[in-house]
Image (cartoon, coloured by chain):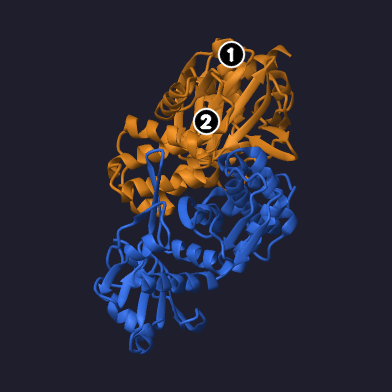
Chain colours: A orange, B blue
Amino acid sequence: MRPLVAVDWGTSSLRVARVDADGTVLEERSSERGILTVPAGAFPDILRETCGDWLHQPEALCLVSGMAGSRQGWQEAPYCSCPAGFTDLSRALAWIEPERIALVPGLRFEFLDTPDAMRGEEVQVFGAMDLLRLQAGMFVLPGTHCKWVRVADGRVQSFATFMSGEFYALLRQHSILARTLPEEDGPLEEAAFLRGVHHAQQARSLLHSAFSARTLALFGRLPTQALPSYLSGLVIGEELRSRALHGLEVVLIGAPALTERYALALRTLGCQSRSLGSEATWRGHWALARTLQKS
Amino acid sequence: MRPLVAVDWGTSSLRVARVDADGTVLEERSSERGILTVPAGAFPDILRETCGDWLHQPEALCLVSGMAGSRQGWQEAPYCSCPAGFTDLSRALAWIEPERIALVPGLRFEFLDTPDAMRGEEVQVFGAMDLLRLQAGMFVLPGTHCKWVRVADGRVQSFATFMSGEFYALLRQHSILARTLPEEDGPLEEAAFLRGVHHAQQARSLLHSAFSARTLALFGRLPTQALPSYLSGLVIGEELRSRALHGLEVVLIGAPALTERYALALRTLGCQSRSLGSEATWRGHWALARTLQKS
């Protein structure tokens, strides 16, 4: 296999890795040059500044995933429709330099006349499938816009986006709760977090349960410093409430600080989980490159 | 009955009315002097500036409802616990000048170890009960923090707060959706609003459904100017989804622009409603004054 330069180019950050033929990550770099900071036409220059030395290797293949493939990015790589597997994705690559640099398309899924979309997470899911040798399962990618991705027969069959990270930030910073919450989140208070998770199961909507963060403070029933953990539990608990879990086993992919919260919430609701971090991203690029070179 | 000066003193506005013995509203005034604008100790002065001429009438009784009775207001009037009726409320008044000026306490309700609270809406509910001669029913007060209030045997038995107005504003102004939505809301687009209401019933959580406002725009499936109506439908629809409606008949109390949206959403989900406006507020003060003078 050719040497691989894997690029995960999101809205607010740019991460790159040099991966060898057997999938080992030799070197990683990251910068704050997310696509929102890149002027039109400057994508090739920024990539060269970040990892030009790697790109100069003979035969290097560069796969770019994430929002760089969106309308606001380097060039639009049209979404690939579900169900989609490695082969579908590799066929839908948008080549910037033929055989050298390609944008990985995102996925789209349509349900009840309403489209859903992702860009970047699909590579992480394929990486997790490859690492764990799974052809089926539920993959959950917590974050600003958390994705629940259902895989069967080695292909993504469907997925759903939850704006959980964003709702937490909105409530934390801009809502009436912001007046009550302490300035800093502090470390997770597990009891308060789990209380939030359980309350969310009863309340049936975050529109209602979120107000309890205010009243519990108002009546002195929860110390101020526990409120961020409680609110986090309400938001993650709301997300889990709306899924038919029934003892489901899920694979969590993301930063440990977040996947640990999801694992805790899932466990208290009777579900098992395994967690993967950034290794899934680079493995996904590598598995895609392998598929590409086989076909 | 003595002449009544009814005061509805909320967070961001101050409204007053002079009500005669049979409940007729003789005169109304309002100002932007909500409690957030009033320095500590200045409440008596602001009230005198607003309606001092009315307070000088011999025998005038002044009842003040709303956040003026909160810890951040004129003086704290401790919450009255549910179930609570006219008599409970009149006994729990916090007198500022004996027999002359009183703060109406808010209500609190406890469910599953979690308190809920209201201040001001209880007077509107009692006013609506009096106007419609109802001793039981479901009263819904849309707004920043919408209240669902269940009345039986002439007393408020339970209630729940939904932060619907606030969530709409958060998503409208501070979320990723703000980038896609037009600057002004424009008039309600009924079809887009109802599409939002229906989608909310399927999506099972606003965390998920809210993302559809982004994807429908992204894929050119809903014109930009229809997005505020669609988002409003998602939020109100989410609130209704979480309630066990089953053909319930509700009384809506609030500004027509909002109660009309709720009526529309309720009707499409098979529920009937009646609507009342500010007349419920003044009628509530008057009915409370009547109860007080009888007892």
Chain for numbered disc 1: A
Of residues B149 and A204, the one drawn nearer to the viewer in this rendering: B149
Camera-nearest label, 1 or 2: 2
State which tag comes first along the sequence, 1 or 2.
1
Mark 2 residue crowding within 10 angstroms, few (<14) / some (14–19) / many (20+)? some
At numbered mark 2, what does the secondary structure look like: helix, strand or loop? helix
Whether residue A243 is situated above or below residue B94 in the rendered picture = above
Q: Position of residue B42 (x, y in %)?
A: 27, 76
Mark 1 residue crowding within 10 angstroms, few (<14) / some (14–19) / many (20+)? some
Of residues A125 and B99, the one drawn nearer to the viewer in this rendering: B99
Query: What amino acid type should be assigned to the residue bearing mark 1?
Result: Asp
Q: Position of residue A49 (x, y in %)?
A: 50, 36
Asked whether residue A30 appears in the rendered view, the answer is yes
Q: Which residue is rendered at x = 61% and y = 38% of the image?
A: B204
Query: Mark 1 highlights which residue?
Result: A130
Query: Mark 2 highlights which residue?
Result: A240
Question: Residue A162 falls in which quadrant of the image?
Answer: top right
Of residues B53 and A10, the one drawn nearer to the viewer in this rendering: B53
Query: What amino acid type should be assigned to the residue bearing mark 2?
Result: Leu
Give me the disc on residue B239. Answer: none
Q: Which residue is rendered at x = 66% and y = 42% of the image?
A: B201
Residue positioned most to the front = B294
Q: Decide if residue B39 is on the left or right side of residue A246.
A: left
Question: Residue A152 falls in which quadrant of the image?
Answer: top right
Q: Which residue is rendered at x = 44% and y = 36% of the image?
A: A199
Chain for numbered disc 2: A
**Image quadrant containing the N terminus of chain B:** bottom left
At numbered mark 1, what does the secondary structure look like: helix, strand or loop? helix
